[in-house]
Amino acid sequence: DRSRARSHELSALLDLDRLLSTPVRQLSLGQRMRCEIAASMLHDPRVLFLDEPTIGLDAVAKLAVRDFVKTLNRERGVTVILTTHDMHDVEALAERVIVIGKGVILADGSLTSLRRGALAERRLWVHLVRDVTAVDIPGAVVRSRQGRSVELAFDPRTTSAHRLIAHIASLFEVEDVHLEE
């Protein structure tokens, strides 16, 4: 029977044979994730949606899940739509990356093109001691402003974070800063 053969194949690919008689409550997170992926593949879907498939997994389990996803895509032609915050998953698995923020598509393309473009931008949040009328910083663009808090965007290839923060501190009394990619 086709479903039994598929079950055996998935069990072998994901190394599940020794887990099949183990109660679910006794499985590790990585073992449960591999079982869930196998269950989702039983009916040979053409598209597989994975939401944070490696979150909380140890390094070995992450590699096993990534290898399996690559195999599904390469050998079975399964389209995998992956939602993740893990850039290692993105680097290992994605041909196309769509960055979504607050329900809006911010970037769409290959990881390489995104790194050159949209992902090259860094953000600096500055909370000032006093409200100021204008914030004009060379090498940075004001993205938003609420009271004494200012969100700046800059390209780290042309403006160093250190120099930008030093320049802002020379112009304004700074209460706090937060920097992220």
Image: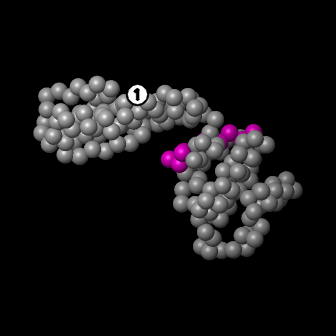
**SS state under label 1:** loop
Residue 147 can be seen in this image: no
Q: Residue 171 location, x and y as percent?
A: 18, 33
Q: Which residue is drawn at 31% across and 44% down?
A: 178
Q: Residue 22 location, x and y as percent?
A: 69, 74
Q: What span is in magenta? A: 77-87
Q: Residue 90 location, x and y as percent?
A: 58, 43
Q: Which residue is drawn at 35% across and 37% down?
A: 161
Q: Residue at x 65, y 74 (%)?
A: 23
User: For the residue marked with disc 1, what is the amino acid?
Assistant: Thr
Q: Which of 47 and 53 is in front in this view?
A: 53
Picture quadrant where residue 93 is located: top right
User: How many dots with numbers?
Assistant: 1
Residue 90 can be seen in this image: yes
Q: Nearer the viewer, residue 39 or 53?
A: 53
Answer left or right for 108 relative to 138.
right
**Residue 133 inside the magenta-drawn segment:** no
Q: Quadrant of the N terminus?
A: bottom right
**Residue 79 inside the magenta-drawn segment:** yes
Above or below, 3 relative to 161: below
Residue receiving disc 1: 158
